Amino acid sequence: MDVQPMEDDATFVRPFIITGGRAEPLQADLRLETLVVAVGVPDETLTFERRHIVAVCAEPTTLAEVASRVGVPLGVAKVLVSDLVVAGRLDCRQPAELPLQMLERIRDHVRAL
């Protein structure tokens, strides 16, 4: 059986590399609708994905939207966001109730993953 490599295979990075081999976030309470906002500006001390997450979170953004915008699976986004919250780079809030428009956006972004 001849297997053809994917065209972008050279740029693909395995998720466990990005998370340092971890599959579980340091914070277990992160949900799809958790709002995440940057505490400061991204700097060169952060890895590419973490720097991108801080930049995306300049405005409050849901965890699902962070995963979509950064282009990583939701589980990877949870680990990275959790790391950034623990490091004091991000702040997260659990919204009491989400408006229907926000739920529809989350659904659409999750489907896009």
Image: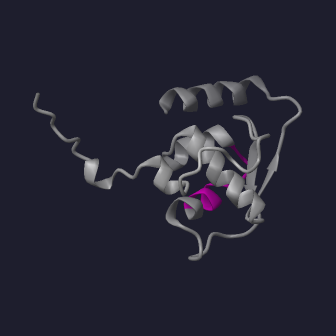
In this rendering, the answer to whether 3 lies above or below 7 is: above
With 5 as the anchor, is 33 left or right in this view? right
**Along the line of sight, the residue nearer the viewer: 88 or 56:** 88
User: Can residue 66 be seen at all in this image of the molecule?
Assistant: no
Q: How is the image coloured?
A: one colour
Q: Residue placed at 70% from the left, 60% from the top?
A: 84
Q: Residue placed at 67% from the left, 55% from the top?
A: 57
User: Can residue 46 be seen at all in this image of the molecule?
Assistant: yes
Q: Write down the region rendered in magenta.
A: 52-62
- Could you say which quadrant of the image residue 86 lies in? bottom right
Residue 31 horizontal/vertical position (percent): 73, 36
* View extreme (left): residue: 2
With 50 as the anchor, is 94 left or right in this view? right
Residue 108 horizontal/vertical position (percent): 57, 27
Asked if the stretch drawn in magenta spans residue 11, the answer is no
* View extreme (bottom): residue: 44
Residue 88 horizontal/vertical position (percent): 78, 65
In this rendering, the answer to whether 101 lies above or below 87 is: above
In this rendering, the answer to whether 2 lies above or below 27 is: above
Q: Quadrant location of the N terminus?
A: top left
Residue 63 horizontal/vertical position (percent): 67, 42
How many numbered badges does the structure rendering display? 0
Q: Residue placed at 74% from the left, 65% from the top?
A: 87
